[in-house]
Amino acid sequence: MTRLEAIHQLNRRLLEELPEYRALARRFPEDAAAQRRLLRSLMNLRPPMPLDRGFLAAQDELLAAEAAERGAVDADALPVTAGRPQLALWQGDITRLRADAIVNAANAALLGCFHPCHGCIDNAIHSAAGLQLRDECARIMDAQGRPEPAGRAKLTPGFNLPARYVLHTVGPIVAGDVTRRDRAELAACYRACLELAAEHGLSSVAFCCVSTGEFRFPNQEAAEIAVGTVTDFLSAPSSLQKVIFNVFKDTDRHIYRRLLGPDRAAETGG
């Protein structure tokens, strides 16, 4: 079976579950890129529900092939910052990192992004991990019985990601000026992720820029809180050996370089 045939098969199975999107699907051309975009869109739109083993096997095969093409980046091999042997800065796609855990900036529902092909990190992580991740998050949230508050963390498997686990945290949404509560909640996000990682004996964690972007926390202040909180945590013994600050935009790379120091403080992962 060709890749396009596999994608067509996956799209057909999803449209059987989601017939309300059949008219939308007809707008997509038949080429591989468009059909793959349709598949991601349908995966983003699909609510948690029982997962068919045949679908998952085909989905996992496709995601594994795509991950191999992108190439994994070994977190242990990333150079550390001079004078800060447990900290590293890496610019690139966090879904390529082979770390014990990567951090997802989630929303309070903790189910991933339902906006088709949205550019947020929540969407990217769920799309690369596969539908199992939304299903696992739904199980956690059903047991919890209420939305996830800001400043906490939940741990799930990484499924089809190179990372073993995903740490999900909800950062503060800034409305107007940054408040003391906003700062405290953002620091709590980093602390909760580190504590949960240490509880599970993990040695490497990669953080995205939590609460920046659509949550409107100013990038400079968010980075200062991130570096300060992580540095404080690492001053005490734990299983954590390396914490990576993962950035995607050049703006954030420059901010973290200034905070961490210029020597080997930023490697670009593409």
Image (cartoon, rainbow, N blue to C red):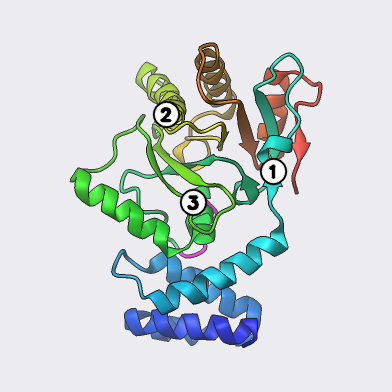
Q: Residue 32: tell me if it is visible.
A: yes
Task: Give whichever of discs 3 and 1 has the lower sequence position.
Answer: 1
Q: Secondary structure at mark 3?
A: loop
Q: Examine the rendering and report whether any part of residue 28 can be seen.
A: no
Between 25 and 100, which is closer to the camera in this rendering?
100
Q: Is residue 149 above or below residue 161?
A: above
Closer to the camera: disc 2 or disc 1? 1
Report crowding for label 1: few under 14, some 14 to 19, many 20 or more residues within 10 A (C-alpha).
few
State the CA–CA distance, disc 2 to disc 3. Answer: 19 Å
- In terms of sequence position, does the residue under pointer 2 or pointer 1 come before the other? 1
Q: Earlier in the sequence, mark 2 or mark 3?
A: 3
Marks 3/1: CA–CA distance: 15 Å
Residue 203, percent across and down? Answer: 56, 31
Task: Determine which quarter of the picture holds residue 144.
Answer: top left
Q: Residue at x 70, y 47 (%)?
A: 73
Across and down, in percent, residue 38 comes to: 52, 76
Location of the N terminus (image quadrant): bottom right
Q: Amino acid at mark 1?
A: Asp
Label tally: 3
Q: Is residue 117 magenta?
A: yes
Q: Helix, strand, or loop for circle 1?
A: strand
Q: Quadrant of residue 50?
A: bottom left
Which residue position holds label 2?
189
Magenta region: which residues? 116-120
Residue found at x 51% / y 61%:
127
Report which residue position mark 1 lands on: 74
For the residue marked with disc 2, what is the amino acid?
Cys
**Distance of mark 2 from mark 1, alpha carbons?**
24 Å
Q: Are marks 3 and 1 in contact (CB under 8 Å)?
A: no
Residue at image point 54% right, 17% down: 234
* Residue type at the position of mark 3: Gly
